[in-house]
């Protein structure tokens, strides 16, 4: 993808401080987004399918065994549990569903559970399917594709020149090899990172142009949530105007990528979330994140519809991994999976007014659905 601005201009835009200048930058990014994607959106939700006890030392993550922080803990979910979360995501209005596991790889047993869960989601929902399971070979990427995965997420996290400050057990080159394996398997790529890890503005520009060389389908932007006990736990939250500013700059450097705001947007952006959406975002990670809470699904939907954007799905069982609701791309009505469920329950009892008892959608809530445990560190004599 060809950037719309040079590195020199990106550095100049990164030095802006006046909100009026940043609003002008946002308008420029908004026009670039509309020219390429129209009113299309790409709303995502996720499930933390395996959590805690990660052997890697990523400085932003409480799941790392090197962090002295409370850690959400649970083993690999069963396929039926993954499907339950996918159905909740669909009912909340998500277009796609990302199944995430901690660490840089899965055992053979856990990988098979993951594949079985993907197959269930592909068969039983109208969601597009994404996976985030760490490093992988071409062979594993092909297995994911066969099961029904369409896009694989694997962040570079930060600029290559700053990477060693963020992680040492996972090499930057290894991340690029995984991204190449995903591409070789014919899958779409989702590659982004985290802002506010202590990188300089120049390194943010470096990261954006490195992403442009990778040319991912999707770019998730995360904003650090400092967590006590992690390497970056003492940092301040990112200034919301600064966060909006950099979303817009990244959009101008990566004009053809699908942008989504993910972890940390609620805490860092607060009431400026809608302005960040206007800075060029295609979608957000709806609802809750890996270990933290987010907006309600309705709040997320409203941020996009208030800008005149289309958040409807199309009945293709997620067959087209790119945005499926750009004006004129497809026709048809989006299926109402909840209404269908209630209708089926009524037919089963012979009473059309019978909704089959109480129907409850359970959204992913890490504050209630995860147990936390302190890490046991080896003591030095």
Image (tube, rainbow, N blue to C red):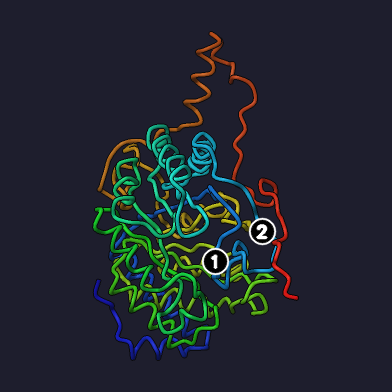
Q: Earlier in the sequence, mark 2 or mark 1?
A: 2
Front residue (pair 229, 32) = 229
Vertical side of 279 occupied by 113: above or below: above
The spot of residue 43 in percent (x, y) is 44, 52
The spot of residue 138 in percent (x, y) is 29, 55
Which is in the foreground here, disc 2 or disc 1? 2
Vertical side of 358 occupied by 266: above or below: below
Q: Which residue lies at the image location 45% right of the left edge and 56% below the top edge?
A: 105
Q: Quadrant of residue 68?
A: bottom right
Question: Left or right of 50: which side holds 43?
Answer: left
Q: Which residue is mark 2?
A: 71
Real-space CA distance between mark 2 and mark 1, rounded to the nearest whole angstrom: 27 Å
Q: Determine whether the residue tagged by mark 2 lies in a helix, strand or loop.
A: strand
Within 10 Å of disc 2 (Cα), the crowding (few <14, some 14-19, many 20+) is many
Q: Which residue lies at the image location 40% right of the left edge and 80% below the top edge?
A: 160
The spot of residue 113 in percent (x, y) is 46, 40
Q: State the residue lying farthest toward the top.
A: 350
Q: Quadrant of residue 119?
A: top left
Q: State the residue lying farthest toward the right.
A: 381
Q: Which residue is mark 1?
A: 273
Front residue (pair 69, 128) = 69
Q: Determine whether the residue tagged by mark 1 lies in a helix, strand or loop.
A: helix
Q: State the residue lying farthest toward the front.
A: 381
Within 10 Å of disc 1 (Cα), the crowding (few <14, some 14-19, many 20+) is many
The spot of residue 273 in percent (x, y) is 54, 66
Residue 140 tag number: none
Front residue (pair 99, 333) = 99
Q: Which residue lies at the image location 34% right of the left edge and 69% below the top edge?
A: 176
Vertical side of 192 occupied by 102: above or below: above
The C terminus lies in quadrant: bottom right
Q: Which residue lies at the image location 59% right of the left edge and 36% below the top edge?
A: 361
């Amino acid at each position: 993808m060809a950037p719309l601005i040079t590195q020199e201009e990106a550095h100049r835009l990164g030095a802006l401080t006046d909100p009026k200048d940043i609003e002008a930058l946002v308008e420029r990014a908004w026009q670039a987004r509309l020219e390429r994607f129209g009113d299309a959106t790409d709303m995502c939700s996720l499930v933390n399918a395996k959590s805690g006890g990660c052997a890697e030392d990523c400085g932003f993550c409480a799941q790392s065994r090197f962090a002295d922080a409370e850690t959400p803990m649970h083993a690999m979910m069963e396929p039926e549990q993954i499907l339950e979360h996918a159905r909740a995501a669909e009912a909340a209005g998500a277009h796609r569903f990302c199944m995430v596991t901690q660490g840089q790889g899965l055992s053979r047993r856990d990988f098979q559970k993951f594949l079985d869960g993907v197959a269930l989601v592909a068969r039983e929902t109208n969601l597009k399917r994404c996976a985030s399971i760490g490093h992988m070979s071409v062979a594993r990427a092909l297995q994911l594709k066969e099961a029904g995965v369409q896009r694989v997420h694997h962040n570079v996290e930060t600029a290559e020149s700053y990477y060693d400050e963020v992680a040492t057990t996972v090499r930057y080159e290894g991340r690029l090899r995984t991204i190449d394996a995903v591409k070789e398997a014919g899958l779409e790529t989702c590659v982004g990172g985290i802002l506010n890890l202590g990188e300089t503005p120049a390194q943010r520009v470096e990261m954006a142009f490195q992403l442009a060389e990778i040319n991912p389908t999707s770019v998730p932007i995360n904003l650090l949530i400092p967590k006590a006990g992690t390497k970056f736990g003492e940092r301040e939250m990112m200034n919301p105007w600064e966060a909006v500013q950099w979303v817009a700059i990244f959009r101008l450097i990566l004009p053809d990528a699908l942008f989504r705001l993910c972890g940390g947007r609620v805490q860092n952006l607060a009431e400026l979330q809608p302005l960040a959406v206007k800075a060029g975002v295609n979608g957000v990670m709806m609802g809750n994140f890996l270990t933290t809470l987010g907006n309600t699904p309705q709040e997320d939907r409203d941020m996009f519809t208030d800008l005149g954007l289309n958040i409807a799905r199309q009945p293709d069982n997620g067959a087209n991994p790119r945005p499926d609701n750009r004006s004129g791309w497809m026709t048809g009505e989006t299926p109402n999976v909840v209404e269908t469920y209630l209708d089926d329950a009524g037919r089963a009892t012979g009473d059309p007014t019978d909704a089959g008892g109480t129907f409850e959608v359970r959204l992913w809530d890490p504050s209630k659905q995860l147990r936390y445990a302190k890490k046991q560190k080896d003591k030095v004599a």
